[in-house]
Image (cartoon, rainbow, N blue to C red):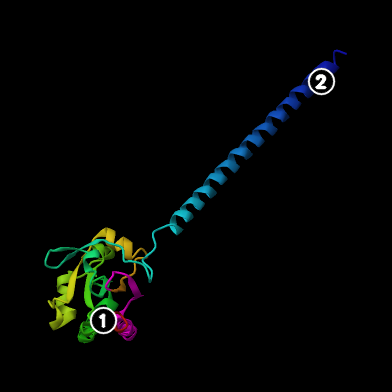
């Protein structure tokens, strides 16, 4: 009898040790699953945040208000443009399509004026983080003799205005607004899309 008790005690200790190892394994598994769930949840939140980011204005919507500063130093708002059709054009001064499109707009400027459309060409906030000429030098270089025309305003966009109209970071995007400030047409690169732009401008009341 004396020889069997130590053996039974050892078995008891071994059983308790096995149970502790099982519990430790279960606790570790629970912790790992919790961490994995937290990571997955964080990814879903990030994805939801990305998809829920403000969208650019769409055709048919009233153009969001916001401020810009003209090359003359005057602060303007998008709301102040109402009352006359406006081509609201956001550019980066280092952008090749913007540099190519501005002379094309200059060539067709008389037609835009005939349709009562004024042009407001503004540099995106901070030039989208890239170096480039000032919007003043840009306008003088690429608009030529049309630079300074009262129907063609050059300026710089506020951060809020850039975020509202260009959440995807395009370097060349424009909005054609009617007299009520409603968006009627959206595109970019006027050097390639001028015909469509003129057709839409001609239909404005």
Contact flag, marks 1 and 2 (Cβ < 8 Å): no
Query: Which image quarter: residue 182?
Result: bottom left
x and y percentages locating residue 121 in the rendered image: 22, 72
Q: Does the magenta stretch include residue 193?
A: yes
Please state the horizontal and vertical placement of residue 42, each as a whole percent of the image: 49, 48
Which sits in the foreground, 100 or 114?
Answer: 114
**Which residue occupies the extreme front position in the image?**
205
Residue that badge 2 annotates: 8
Residues shaded magenta: 179-201
Relative vertical location of residue 185 with respect to residue 24 in this rendering, above or below: below
Identify the element where label 1 is drawn: helix
Cα separation between marks 1 and 2? 92 Å
Q: Is residue 183 left or right of residue 156?
A: right
Residue 64 position in % (x across, y down): 31, 63
Q: Which mark is residue 100?
A: 1
171 left or right of 153 in image: right
**Residue drawn 35% across the image and 63% down it:** 167
Q: At numbered mark 2, what does the secondary structure look like: helix, strand or loop?
A: helix
What residue is drawn where x is 20% and y is 82%? Answer: 113
- Nearest-to-viewer mark from 1 and 2: 1
**Badge 2: few (under 14), some or many (20 or more) residues near its Cα, within 10 Å?**
few
Q: Where is residue 197 in the image (x, y as percent from the top left)?
A: 31, 82
Left or right of residue 169, residue 80 in this image: left
Of the numbered discs 1 and 2, the one sitting upstream in the chain is: 2
């Amino acid at each position: 009898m004396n020889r069997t008790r130590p053996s039974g005690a050892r078995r008891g200790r071994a059983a308790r040790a096995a149970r502790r190892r099982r519990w430790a394994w279960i606790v570790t598994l629970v912790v790992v699953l919790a961490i994995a769930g937290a990571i997955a949840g964080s990814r879903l939140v990030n994805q939801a945040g990305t998809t829920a980011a403000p969208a650019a204005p769409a055709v048919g919507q009233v153009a969001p208000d916001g401020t810009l500063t003209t090359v003359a130093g005057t602060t303007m708002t998008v709301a102040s443009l109402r009352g006359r059709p406006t081509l609201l054009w956001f550019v980066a001064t280092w952008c090749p399509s913007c540099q190519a499109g501005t002379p094309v707009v200059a060539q067709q400027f008389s037609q835009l004026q005939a349709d009562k459309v004024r042009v407001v060409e503004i540099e995106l906030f901070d030039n989208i983080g890239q170096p480039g000429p000032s919007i003043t030098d840009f306008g003088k270089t690429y608009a030529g003799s049309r630079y300074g025309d009262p129907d063609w305003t050059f300026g710089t966009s506020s951060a809020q205005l850039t975020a509202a109209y260009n959440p995807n970071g395009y370097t060349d995007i424009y909005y054609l607004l009617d007299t009520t400030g409603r968006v009627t047409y959206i595109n970019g690169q006027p050097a390639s899309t001028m015909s469509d732009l003129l057709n839409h401008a001609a239909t404005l009341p």
